[in-house]
Image: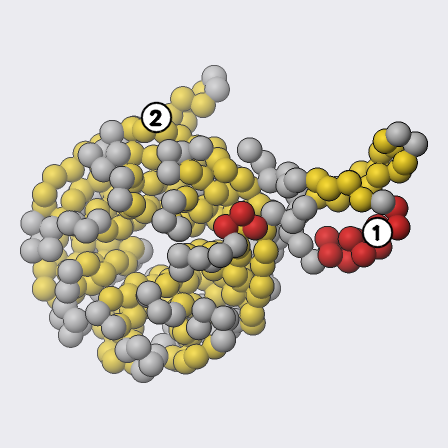
Amino acid sequence: MNARGWRSKLPRMLIAGIAIIAATAIVSEISSDRDVGGELVVEVPTPTIESRSWAAGQEPTGVIFDGERLWVAETGFGTVTSYGLEGQRLDTADVGGQPAVLASGRGFVWALDTGDGSVTQLDADANVVRKFQVGLDPTGLVFFGDHLWVSDPIRGSVSKISLQGALAQLLEIGVSPGAITKTPEQVLVIDDETLTVTGIDEDGNLVGSFEYPGQIDIGDFEHIPGAPTAFLSTSDALWIAFGGIGQVMRLTPAGNFSSLTRVPTGHLALAWNGNELWVVSTDAATITRISGTGTIVETHDIGGHPTSIAHDGNHGWVTDDEKNVLIQFTPVDLVP
């Protein structure tokens, strides 16, 4: 359902006070007046989501949570900054270029520069450990086991890279491997051309693949999904977001089709809060909450130009490269 919020009936004398409160909240409909038993009642939507924001570097485009702190890729400044869970800036690393995609593991953070094909490795205090090249056009980045895994659709490969930045394996994966994620047992990578998901174990062995539906019936039309804009694995599902058609596909871990959920079109980013999938739409400036079975819980209008999302278990964190802020979101029904 859409975010409408619950309504409360309030006397006229409280209008001014409530207006001030409502002005600070994100709501999805306009208040209305109606006459009930001769008394004018003003209906004011109850806020459905709480938010706080903090200044970030220029053009923050990526955010991850490493289990202790948040890391934000600030593309405009060529920096990566860590934040505490109260929004406080901790440390900043000047990595140069245009860092955009982040991954973490074993006490390190990696920032992928999709412009020059390099990765910068940082320690927990945001000190630069090393910088190295990873491919011609790297797009996906994930840490699994004791290695970093990077997909490169131009080269048609996935690189397995050691903690010391050395290339351990170069795996040829289909035609155009792009979006990448991980499960407890394997790395999963999507081939944008063949619509195939391939699994890779920790030793670099290909452990199986499957094709996801290449056409989706929507109304009277059949749409070819095209390249996914986001890919995420949870304990009992695989989620693939197709921004071009505004759909999120849910597959079982075995690759069987489960459900399809309509969301706004455009660039999409995904995060899992333990029970729900959160989908950020950059073009529509919304967060859509989807249940574990693929049903829409609520959609929140958040404004600005949100680019990425992470979840720390209690709050959602969104970067906005128009306002240059890091925003914490908490639906009121999930306030701890």
Q: Quadrant of residue 164?
A: bottom left
- Residue 34 lies, in percent from the top left, at 85, 33
Residue furthest toward the right? 38
**Amino acid at circle 1:** Leu
Q: Distance between the residues labelled 1 and 2?
A: 54 Å
Q: Which of 235 and 166 is in front in this view?
A: 235
- Around disc 1, counting alpha carbons within 10 Å, would you say few (fewer than 14), some (14 to 19), or many (20 or more)? few
Residue at left offset 66%, top offset 40%: 6
Residue 141 lies, with reference to residue 229, above or below; the image says: below
Look at the numbered disc 1 and give the secondary structure of its residue: helix
Residue at left offset 68%, top offset 46%: 46
Reading the image, the residue beneath label 1 is: 14
Q: Which of 70 and 44 is in front in this view?
A: 44
Quadrant placement of the N terminus:
top right
Q: Tell me if I can see residue 249 in this picture.
A: no
Q: Which of 21 and 125 is in front in this view?
A: 21
Residue 78 lies, with reference to residue 315, above or below; the image says: below
Q: Which of marks 1 and 2 is nearer the N terminus?
A: 1
Q: Nearer the viewer, residue 275 or 129?
A: 275
Q: Would residue 182 be found to the left or right of residue 80 on screen?
A: left
- Residue 219 lies, in percent from the top left, at 48, 19
Residue at left offset 81%, top offset 56%: 17
Q: Tell me if I can see residue 184 in this picture.
A: yes
Reading the image, the residue beneath label 2 is: 215
Q: Which of marks 1 and 2 is in front?
A: 1
